[in-house]
């Protein structure tokens, strides 16, 4: 990374840690150059980088000032509705495009973490070679379960290693939880909108769906309790922290009540907590399982979003269902378990999470500024305090037309309709913010914005960017 960009990232880090605050005056260019032992031209490039990204405000004859506040943007509105059984299930069609940085929710590869993982693999191969020739433990290798137990306890969620089962990722953990708690033809309550992967899983298992309205503080628990009371659902399946796609985190009060409802009505609630550790600050949100005394909350997570989806390694705290849950497993490959355990025990995982959280906070600021400046008027953008996605609501948007045009341009995005079995969210789009905003990402965003404008009614399209311009932008990239 060029020196001026390194200096810019350090200043952004100081802003996030509040060492530098909104309105603080920066050093003059000459003093800044002298302090950091760089040329004045490097200092100028650093300040220009910060100004372009919205972190500095240049005031004539006054100097440069910190500008760290996210631009004021309207957030999507969440409307209450009466939950009903989904009878007209939408066909699930996989995107016919190559995976891109705006599509799948994932983080940018971390070279430091990759190198640390290489060292962990080497140590395991050297120190535990004999263990690698044996069948894996059904519940998961004790060394990994112990490492996870210690890690979660340090985050405020005390768990004994014997409460955990190691799985082939979070989706595998959720699938097993469904298989042991409900039967084909049963009905499962989910949030609305709901991650499309979960909707696909439920359909593949022959399960019916009732969507629960999202609220600013979580989901409509009054509506959910009525379904529990009337025995209209046999289980709940919810992402509770940094929800995908809507970015909402259930409040502690909501999580306590959700746990209490599961115990009161003896209905299993499966908690998909794959974004649990991806907060954009040091404030961690405890899971619903933290408040669970009855054992009816089945907590699922993985390293897919925090480290790499290629490892296919996750965990589950099955609660009262642990014996039945464990019977579904024959173990997960030992090598990856022991390597991840080493990665955690050496402190590499905690250091990695710190870097990822900082970068995601920066990404959210950068993406929000860019989108706020270029999206059509009256657009709404979520402002999550964690996770990997932004949810955009654009008045008048024909999202299906947008999807068709995006496929033609091989642009990977997710439109709102894939996150529901209803006719809601047809004016919404979800994008990933796991990659730092650079020229290539800006090019993709400009293409997306051009397509959005081309899919609006003429009377509401106030931007000068057209679909033809989007094609030109993409052709230049190629």
Image (cartoon, grey):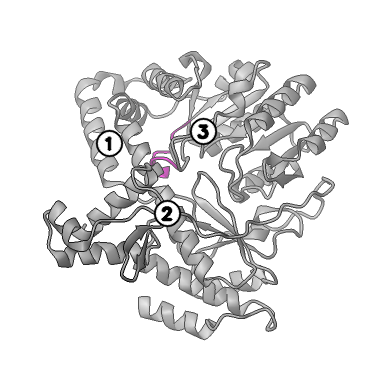
Of circles 1 and 2, the one toward us is: 2
Task: For the C terminus, give its image quadrant.
Answer: bottom left
Counting residues from the start of the chain, the first of labels 3 and 2 encountered is 2
Residue at 29 percent of width and 67 percent of height: 48
Distance between mark 3 and mark 2 Cα atoms: 33 Å
Q: Please tell me how crowded label 1 is: few (under 14), some (14-19), or many (20+) other residues with Cα within 10 Å.
A: many
Which image quarter: residue 235? Answer: top right
The circle drawn on residue 301 is 3
What residue occupies the far front of the structure in this picture? 61
Task: Look at the magenta stretch and give its main secondary structure.
Answer: loop
Q: Which residues are magenta?
A: 305-314
Question: CB atoms at circles 1 and 2 under 8 Å apart?
Answer: no
* Badge 2 element: loop
Which image quarter: residue 188? Answer: top right
Direction from residue 457 to residue 57 in the image, left or right: left
Q: Position of residue 181 (x, y in %)?
A: 69, 27
Q: Position of residue 374 (x, y in %)?
A: 51, 72
Which residue is label 2 attached to? 68
The circle drawn on residue 377 is none
């Amino acid at each position: 990374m060029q020196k001026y960009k390194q200096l810019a990232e350090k200043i952004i880090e100081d802003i996030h840690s509040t060492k530098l605050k909104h309105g603080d005056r920066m050093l003059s260019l000459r003093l800044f150059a002298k302090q950091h032992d760089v040329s004045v031209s490097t200092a100028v490039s650093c300040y220009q980088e910060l100004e372009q990204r919205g972190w500095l405000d240049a005031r004539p004859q006054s100097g440069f000032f910190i500008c760290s506040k996210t631009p004021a943007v309207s957030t999507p509105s969440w409307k209450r509705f009466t939950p009903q059984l989904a009878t007209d299930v939408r066909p699930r069609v996989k995107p016919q495009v190559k995976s891109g940085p705006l599509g799948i929710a994932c983080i940018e590869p971390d070279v430091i973490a990759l190198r640390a993982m290489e060292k962990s693999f080497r140590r395991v191969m050297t120190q535990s070679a004999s263990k690698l020739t044996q069948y894996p433990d059904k519940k998961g290798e004790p060394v990994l379960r112990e490492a996870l137990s210690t890690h979660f306890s340090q985050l405020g969620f005390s768990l004994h290693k014997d409460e955990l089962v190691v799985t082939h990722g979070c989706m595998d953990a959720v699938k097993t939880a469904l298989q042991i708690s409900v039967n084909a033809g049963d009905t499962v309550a989910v949030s609305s909108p709901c991650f499309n992967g979960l909707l696909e899983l439920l359909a593949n298992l022959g399960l019916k769906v009732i969507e629960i309205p999202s609220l600013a503080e979580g989901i409509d628990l009054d509506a959910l309790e009525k379904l529990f009371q009337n025995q209209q659902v046999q289980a709940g399946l919810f992402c509770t922290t940094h929800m995908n796609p809507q970015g909402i985190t259930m409040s502690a009060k909501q999580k306590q009540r959700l746990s209490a409802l599961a115990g009161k009505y003896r209905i299993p609630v499966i908690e998909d907590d794959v974004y649990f550790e991806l907060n954009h600050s040091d404030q961690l949100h405890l899971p619903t399982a933290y408040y669970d005394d009855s054992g009816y909350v089945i907590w699922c997570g993985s390293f897919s979003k925090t480290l790499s989806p290629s490892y296919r390694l996750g965990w589950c705290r099955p609660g009262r269902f642990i014996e039945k849950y464990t019977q579904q497993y024959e173990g997960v490959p030992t090598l990856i378990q022991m390597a991840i355990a080493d990665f955690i025990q050496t402190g590499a995982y905690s250091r990695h999470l710190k870097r990822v959280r900082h970068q995601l906070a920066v990404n959210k600021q950068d993406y929000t500024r860019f989108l706020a400046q270029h999206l059509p008027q009256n657009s709404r953008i979520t402002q999550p305090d964690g996770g990997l996605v932004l949810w955009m609501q654009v008045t008048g948007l024909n999202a299906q037309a947008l999807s068709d045009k995006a496929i033609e341009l091989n642009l990977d995005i997710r439109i709102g309709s894939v996150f529901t079995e209803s006719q809601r969210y047809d004016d919404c789009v979800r994008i990933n913010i796991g990659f730092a905003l650079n020229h290539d990402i800006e090019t993709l965003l400009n293409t997306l914005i051009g397509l959005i404008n081309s899919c609006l009614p003429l009377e509401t399209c106030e931007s000068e960017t057209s679909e033809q311009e989007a094609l030109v932008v993409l052709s230049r990239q190629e």
